[in-house]
Amino acid sequence: MGMSNFWVFWVNTSIATYFAAMLRRQGSFPHFYASPVAAKLRKNRYNANPSDCPLVDSAVKFDYIIGVKDDIFSSRGNLKMIKKIHILVSLLVFGLIFGVTYVNAADYEQEFVVRPEPILSGGANRLDLRFNIRHGKVTLKLSDDPDFIVKVLVGYDKKELTPISSESFSEGTFSVDFSSGDFSDQDMASPLQIWEIQIGKYDLETNLTLDFTGVQTHMNLGGMPLDTLALNFKGTQATVDISEPTFFSVRKLGITIEGTFLTLANTGNTNFEKFQLKAVGSSMDLDFRGAYAAGDYNADFNLSGSSARLSLPVTAGALVVHRPENRPVALAGGGWSKELSGSPAGYMTDDYEDQESKLNLYISSLATSVHIKREGTNLQYQLSY
């Protein structure tokens, strides 16, 4: 609650308290009570075969509101008391109009739960998760709770903003899609939905796809059983951390962003085999630290009208190849060598051949600035417009 709302709340509360005391002394104090607007609409637990029943539990919850009994004006109220009641009601209405938010009425929560027993017993050997979210705030993290594979809680304040889910099972792959639902793009000044996503620990290769538009998000994907990861962001502010190695090596890491601010930390903890990034009109901070195994790690970047800042670890050699070749390159701090054998030619760190882990960065850019710095050293690579 902001300071202005706080003072409105304080003044109205003080006035209301004063009149309530007067009303109580005269025996005409209204009796308030809490009443449920609605109970949970549907809450089922399925432990059967995927073909027999839906595998995603869903429930709708409602907050409580304050109701007023019918005898609010009963008994000894005279004309003078009625005037006092009218003043009290007017003051409360004034407070509500000017932003008093201490009564949170009719907020909705939608919960989805994907449980492991029916999926695993049904013969699934792969999981496909997709989140299509618009105009919301999203948090995503790993959970140690063994009772679910995925748990999603969505908060929203209008019934028409109810999110939806769908599931399917085909050829050993269980697929679940979560979506913001169908609503018109209006009132974009603030997020329309609040998503809290938890993914459990399970031994099932997972394809995770995140399609976000107009989203603010902070995610930690460390330790998750990811086989492929696709991030498709538009008009989004995103911080993505892979704080610990993923349960499986990520075969394909794909990022497509437009008009987005992206911070990606500890990318090496995915142990990616292939990393593709396409950016238009975006700003990126990419941190390649992580627990690298021996081998080559290939990244292919296509950047347009963007800016990118890359941080490389000292635990892996680096090769940087940029296209077109005539772009101006500024090298600083020493430690770079011209690599002449490839076409087009690039630059490599002096320890490239000696390192067991090798980062190979191929960058195509247009109207883009790229700054590469090696962690803990003065080694820098500047690719300007």
Image: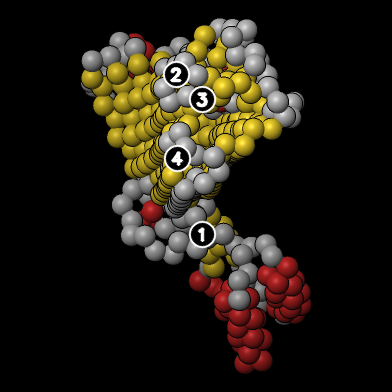
**Number of callouts:** 4
| Residue bearing mark 1 | 190
Between 378 and 343, the one lying in front of the other is: 343
Confirm or deny contact between disc 3 and disc 2 (CB under 8 A). yes
Q: Which mark is residue 168?
A: none
| Relative image position of residue 222 (x, y in whole percent) | 57, 23
Q: Residue at x 46, y 55 (%)?
A: 192
Quadrant of the snapshot with the N terminus:
bottom right
What is the C-alpha distance between the residues marked 2 and 1? 50 Å
The amino acid on which the numbered mark 2 sits, given as a three-letter code, is Gly
| Relative image position of residue 219 (x, y in whole percent) | 55, 35
Between 152 and 312, the one lying in front of the other is: 312
| Residue bearing mark 4 | 365
Q: Earlier in the sequence, mark 2 or mark 1?
A: 1
Q: Earlier in the sequence, mark 4 or mark 3?
A: 3
| Residue bearing mark 2 | 342
Confirm or deny contact between disc 1 and disc 4 (CB under 8 A). no
What is the C-alpha distance between the residues marked 3 and 1? 45 Å
Which dot, 2 or 1, sits closer to the camera? 2
Q: Earlier in the sequence, mark 1 or mark 4?
A: 1
Q: Earlier in the sequence, mark 3 or mark 1?
A: 1
The amino acid on which the numbered mark 3 sits, given as a three-letter code, is Gly
Badge 3 crowding class, 10 Å Cα cut-off, few under 14, some 14 to 19, many 20 or more, is many
The amino acid on which the numbered mark 1 sits, given as a three-letter code, is Ser
| Residue bearing mark 3 | 346
Camera sees residue 149: no
| Relative image position of residue 148 (x, y in whole percent) | 47, 23
The amino acid on which the numbered mark 4 sits, given as a three-letter code, is Ser
> Which type of secondary structure does the marked residue at label 1 adopt?
loop
In the image, residue 241 above or below residue 318? below
Confirm or deny contact between disc 3 and disc 1 (CB under 8 A). no
